[in-house]
Image: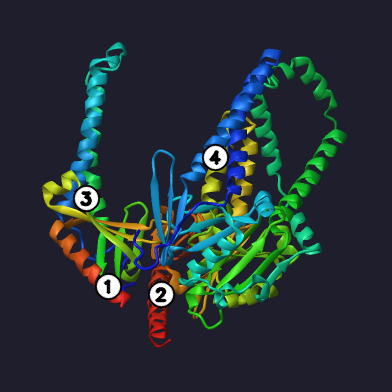
Amino acid sequence: MQSDGMQDEPSAMAPLDPAHATVLRMRTGLIFLVLALAAAIADLGPLRLTPIPAGLALGLVLLAGVAATLIFPGRRYRAWGYREGGDEIEIKRGRLIRVRTIVAYGRVQHIDVAQGPIQRAFGLGTLILHTAGTHGASVPLPGLAYGDAERMRDRIRARIRQDLV
Amino acid sequence: MSAPAPAPEEKRLHPASLIVRWLKIVPQMLAGGIGLAATSNHEGIRRFILFAMFAALAGALFALVSWWRFLYTIGPGEIAIEKGVFRRQRRVIPFDRVQDVAIERGLIARLFGTARVRVETGGAGKDEGELDMVALGEAHALRDRVRHGAPADGGAAARAPAEETVLFALDGPRLLLSGLFGFSLVFLAAIGALVQQLDQFGIVDWDQWFTAERAEAASNLVTLQTSLALALLIVLAGLAAGLVRTVLRDFGFRLTRTGAGGMAGSSRGLRRRRGLFTLSEVVIPLGRTQAALIESGPVARAFGWYRLSFQTLGADRKEGGVQVAAPFARMAEILPILAEAGFPAPPPPAAFRGGPRRALVHWAAPWLALALAAAAGAWLIDLRAAIAAAAFVLLGLAAMLHWRVHRHAQDAEALYVSHGLLKRRLAVMPYEKTQILAVSRGPLQRGLALATIIVDTAGAQPMRGIRIIDLDAKEADEGADRLHGAFLAARAARKAGAAYG
């Protein structure tokens, strides 16, 4: 049994694929690009009628975007970790609210491997474990190399089958 | 048709269901027509009568067609339901996916000797398989067949409920007493809804009613005496409403043991029958109970009355996703039922532990912060905010009291968590029922080195899951690992037992 999973220093948990930090960065960047576009439109239109200097809104959004893209995704990436055990998988996540989840293979109903468009560009995937529970019954594990995610799914599937015998 | 040997026959519902369907449809159609009548001249009333006749006819036709197009087949291992007037839908429910078969008999059903059968699979859908209505004998046969996987041709499976051992009964004075504890003010909401409906259909225009003069006259009537009388009236009405509701629901409450003694564990269950006008009968399958809950409100607890229910997969959402096994019982009566269901008895109060004292900060701090903000508001903006500040302080104190009663215990078989300041619930969860374990730490908890263990079970209602809030962080981490270890051990033990048994 691991009991040091919640500690802040690096524990026995494996980190996600480093490319996942880039994926998170691009997601944050995209959101701020959309916001910047909206700010630019506001700058050319309605804001012209107010004494707010031209370009201020756009500048602020861009500044916030650059800061957010540089700071948060890296932290969020480092908050993730997982450990594939013999009978269970352990996943830790969350920067503000830190959660360590233990899912016994015997409880997994089915497994998905999902891939978003940005993830596809980096060859990453998300492993999703579904259980019969009700409160957060589906546990996602993003940021695995797609092949790894598939191999992990197959390993867990084999263990579920063993568990059923 | 998938059955190989004798082709199971397709059946229609009992013809009496035509009447039930008709009685359901026509009022719905008429509700739309009330607006016509509300124009309140002769023309309006004549139009309404015409409309009512049309509704009665159309309703009959619709009921007939949907009855004709509803077919069900009870195969060897599954039940198939085919329905829909234009868009046909065929649903097949395998017996081994059925969590629960509930039989319900309203007044009309009892008149015709029929019943409504609801097949629950624990899926997300609402009406998963409903036969409304079939003959009572057919309903019982179907249930026995689902539960035993074989035709109930007079074998031990189809034993009469009357012969089963009664585990709990509620009648006579105790039923009335439990009704008094069922004090409820929902009727106030019902009156509010009625007032709104009347206004909506234009029968009464409240804006015309409440004129300034009338409001003035009414305010003169508000004295200490009238207020007290009104309060007394509301309390009495609340008691009466609770009494009526409880008697209607729990009249003749019987919990019996069902399933032939020597059969496999999965077919054993607790059969619950109750109801004054609408008789309902469900079987709580023992292999599928996830947790037991012992609850009581503040007054009932002072008198030593508790309610026992089981969290199952197919439970009715209306009841909060649990099946009530004993609505109003002494602890001494609850323990044998728990034992019957294979649940351990909760340990004595001394065995329960709370979290570290510093957790009080986490429970009270949010309320005290709000109180501070309100106090600042009272000082700077409006003195009346002081009332809000006082209320927040009280809520903070209540949270601190709540912390005192949030306790947990563990023994060889199960986890016990007690929660709730006024209405207290004790959850009993055998380790084997764990789905997911999680340890969660928010920002304030991190500062205080605290953590919450969340235990997810199947069929739990959102917000009502089992959680041990604010343990010491290290203890919570080790606790979660221990719970996981206990789950693995319990599962291995059961598998070993199943291999030999």
Amino acid type at circle 1 is: Arg
> Could you give the CA–CA distance between mark 3 and mark 4, rounded to whole angstroms?
63 Å
Q: Name the mark nearer the viewer: 3 or 4.
A: 4
Instruction: Point out which mark residue A74 bears.
Output: 3
Same-chain check, marks 4 and 1: no
Mark 1 — on which chain does it sit? A
Q: Mark 1 points at which residue?
A: A161
Pick whichever of labels 2 and 4 is earlier in the sequence: 4
Residue drawn at x 61%, y 44% is B20
Would you say B411 lies left or right of B229 here?
left
Q: Is mark 1 on a helix, strand or loop?
A: helix
Residue drawn at x 75%, y 47% is B241
- Give coordinates of residue B354: x percent, y percent: 55, 68
Viewer-closest of B273 and B222? B273
Mark 3 — on which chain does it sit? A
Amino acid type at circle 3 is: Gly
- Give coordinates of residue B316: x percent, y percent: 54, 55
Amino acid type at circle 2 is: Phe
Would you say B156 lies left or right of A137 here?
right
> Could you give the CA–CA distance between mark 4 and mark 1, rounded to whole angstroms?
48 Å
Q: Mark 4 points at which residue?
A: B63
Q: Name the mark nearer the viewer: 1 or 2.
A: 1
